[in-house]
Image (tube, rainbow, N blue to C red):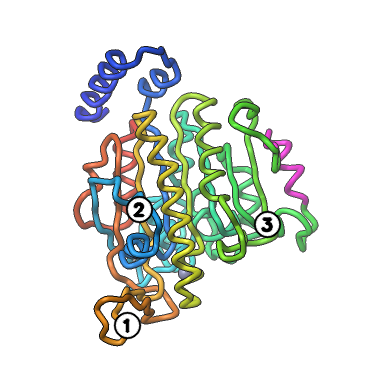
Amino acid sequence: MNQLFKIFIIVLLTFSMVTSCVSNHQEAKVVEGNPNVILLIGDGMGLSQVSAAYYYGKNEPNFNRFKEIGLINTSSVKHKITDSGAAATALACGEKTYNGVIGLDKDSTEIPNLVEELSLIGFSTGVISTSSITHATPAGFYSHVWNRGMQYEIAEQLVNSELDFFAGGGTKWFMDREDGKLLIPELEKNNFLINSDITASTLDPNYKYAYLLAKDGMPSMLDDRGAFLPDYTKLALDYFTKRGGSFFLMVEGSQIDWAAHDNNSDYMIAEVLDFDKTVGVVMDYAELKGNTLVIVLADHETGGFALGTNDGDYSTIKPVFATYGHSTTLVPVFAYGPGAENFKGVYDNNDIFHKILSLTGN
Ligand SMILES: [Zn+2]
């Protein structure tokens, strides 16, 4: 274990013993083990998308709660401009690969992802996204396929993955399949409760929880998705707290990317604000519980988005896009919690995986 981290634990333990009048054994239990890791990915969320939260949000953005900031280069192994498959593989598996590939290295060899690595050492794991749960970014955290379009295979791999909790859209990949396979009963066989109506007090840590809440992607914020992302993130945190021990949770704001592909700034800003609200839920948890590393980043920028002038008028902003595709500008990394200082600097997207594993007993 990292020396600095040991000191952190001692300080934290001492601090909680001195300050807490009410004994809280759950906090102490978590502090003894590895830090929890919560990775929030704004798909397509470059610095201008983050900045939009500062100009279009009603409240102070939760991005403001971070002190350790870095930048990552998102290029894939062959292309200067990455897609979400290669980017997810770099973040989740620690190696740059070809665009479109999930969980395989540049020689097409399967490489372990964070969910596999961390579940081996006793972490509970979860994935939440506003896309189909089989979409490229979440898929990077539990599957291995040579083409991100293989969503039937990805769904099958999810059923047999180490995940304990997942939430998103994508029922079409689990039922009414072309091959007739019924994956919902398979999930139930693997101890999952599906779309279970639970609260923090009624959830049962002996089960795993699956939420498939739309046929494909979840509705957009402009289409009344409501508080899905912050609420299910909170539910996952309640679940992991009840299970005890350390956990890894990946949460993706998928539709920042989709809106930017459409060059639709109202849609994109609504998605950024929803993502920021979710960052707030996670930061509230991390600040209260301690021993939780929070990393907020993007897999790449989409749209070449800028907060430009309105025809030369410097008093108002006009959101503008330079492309309907992705761009290769460096994207920001925000970190909080034990080891957060390791995420400062300018480095490659695949270093995120190695930095996380170096802090979690590997
Ligand atoms: Zn995209």
Q: Relative to 287, does residue 80 appear above or below in the rendering?
A: below
Label 1 crowd (10 A; few <14 / some 14-19 / many >=20): few
Residue matched to label 3 = 214
Q: Position of residue 333 (x, y in %)?
A: 30, 53
Task: Please provide the residue range marked out in magenta.
Answer: 182-193
Q: Is 344 left, or right, of 76 in this rendering?
A: left
Amino acid carrying label 3: it is Ala
Q: Which residue matches tag 2?
A: 61
Amino acid at dot 1: Asn
Residue depicted at 76% across the width and 42% down the height: 185
Rendered view: 322 above or below 224: below
The residue sitting at 30% across, 87% down in the picture is 311
Front in this rendered view, residue 267 or 86: 267
Sequence order check, earlier mark of 2 and 1: 2
**x, y percentage for residue 39?**
41, 46
Q: Nearer the viewer, mark 1 or mark 3?
A: 1
User: Which residue is farthest front?
Assistant: 315
Spatial separation of the CA atoms under disc 2 and disc 3: 29 Å
Q: Is residue 216 left or right of residue 352?
A: right
